[in-house]
Amino acid sequence: MLDAAARLFYERGVHEVGMDGLITATGLGKATVYRLFPSKDALVGAYLARQAEQILGLIDAEIDQRPDDPTGALLAILDAIERDLNRPGFRGCAFNNASIEYDDPNHPARVQARHYREELHKRLTGLAADLDSNDGAKLGSQLAVLIDGAYTNAAHLGPGGPAAEGVALARLLVTSQG
């Protein structure tokens, strides 16, 4: 169910995809789906929670592969972001796309987007602090903003131009430390 939701929500938008369409796409029975996810809101929250877990897991793996090389870890993360921005079917940040559809800050989409951003920022700031103990928090925040900007620009203007420049600027900030 989450695989179908991830594909359809990302391709078409959360509001454009109904539960009946998801049920048809999965071949599961309606009772089974509603037992697993009592509401579409619950499914949206689960979809984004899984997205966050997967992305943050990949970031953690990059960090774990380079325990004494925060520069290398940050550059590997930026490389992965650049590949993501250039992948076929790219439509922007899944968290932005889903959460922007809801006004309520307590909606599961907004809660999961906030959680993901906080966790990403924590990892960037931790690595940045290893590079520059005086300004690690500032560098981590700068990288977070550049990454968000790259995703937004790539969604609207394509992966070249401002998105590519944002990633290049993030690389420059990382390599200029120390």
Image (cartoon, rainbow, N blue to C red):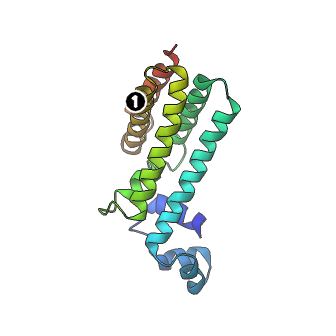
Asked if residue 17 is positioned above or below residue 143 in the image, the reply reads: below
Furthest residue in direction front, as rendered: 134
Relative to 63, say whether 155 is above or below: below
Q: Is residue 164 visible?
A: no
Secondary structure under badge 1? helix
Residue drawn at x 56%, y 78% as measured from the top left:
24
Farthest bottom residue in view: 31
Figure check: 120 above or below 33: above
Q: Which residue has dot 1 on it?
A: 142
Residue at 52% x, 13% y is 178
Residue 90 at what x, y percent from top left?
Answer: 49, 48
Q: In which quarter of the image is residue 100?
A: bottom left
How far from the left and from the top, in percent, is residue 164? 44, 30
Quadrant of residue 60 within the rendered picture: top right
Residue 34 at x, y = what percent? Answer: 53, 81
Few, some or many residues within 10 Å of mark 1 (<14, 14–19, 20+): some
Taking the spot 52% from the left edge, 62% from the top edge, the residue there is 47
> Image point 46% across, 29% down: which residue?
167
Is residue 110 in sight in this rendering? yes
Q: Nearer the viewer, residue 175 or 24?
A: 175
Which residue reaches farthest right?
A: 65
Q: How many labels does the image show?
A: 1
Residue 176 placement, left or right of 32:
left
Three-letter amino acid code at the position of disc 1: Gln
How far from the left and from the top, in percent, is residue 73?
61, 29
Q: Considering the image in quadrants, where does the N terminus appear? A: bottom right
- Position of 117 with respect to 65 (left or right) is left
